[in-house]
Image: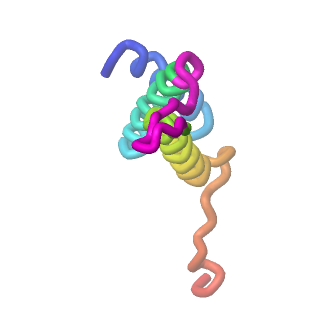
Amino acid sequence: MTEAQKHIHSKLVALYETRADLTPGQHELLYTLACVILEEQTLQNYCDKHGTCYEVVGKSGDTYSRMRPEWQQLKEARHRKQIIITRLENWIGEGRPVEDEAAKYFG
């Protein structure tokens, strides 16, 4: 784990530990979230510097724009981040227990 990952992970753990006791799986998910956050920042910095597209000259000599692979990676990282955050919020929520869907049928 890099220093930047450790820093983000520590902040996330501190934030979520105030709301619930974290399981080992939730700690790992927070580590993954820290990695995705850092990846997102790195890719955003790249896109800010170089743009989201680049120009290509085709066989006919026409110039057209292509999306940078880094832009696609950034969009994917943001999607992963949102999935992880949603899962954490569903598990940990705002200190509320997660409802058991089956309880309404068998309870």
In-front residue for pair 32/54: 54
Q: Is residue 59 magenta?
A: yes
Chain part drawn in magenta: 47-63
Instruction: Point out residue 3 in the picture as x, y percentages from the top left corner.
Output: 37, 13
Instruction: Point out residue 96 in the picture as x, y percentages from the top left corner.
Output: 67, 52
Q: Residue at x 52, y 39 (%)?
A: 62
Instruction: Point out residue 48 in the picture as x, y percentages from the top left corner.
Output: 59, 20
Which quadrant holds residue 51? top right
In-front residue for pair 76/4: 76
Q: Residue at x 36, y 42 (%)?
A: 24
Seen as rendered, the residue at the extreme bottom is: 105
Picture layout, residue 1 above or below residue 101:
above
Seen as rendered, the residue at the extreme left is: 1
In-front residue for pair 18/30: 30
Q: Residue at x 63, y 65 (%)?
A: 99
Q: Is residue 57 magenta?
A: yes
* Quadrant containing the C terminus in the rendered view: bottom right
Seen as rendered, the residue at the extreme front is: 60
Instruction: Point out residue 73 in the picture as x, y percentages from the top left corner.
Output: 46, 39
Residue 54 visible to the viewer: yes
* Quadrant containing the N terminus in the rendered view: top left
State how the image is colored. Answer: rainbow
Residue 33 visible to the viewer: no
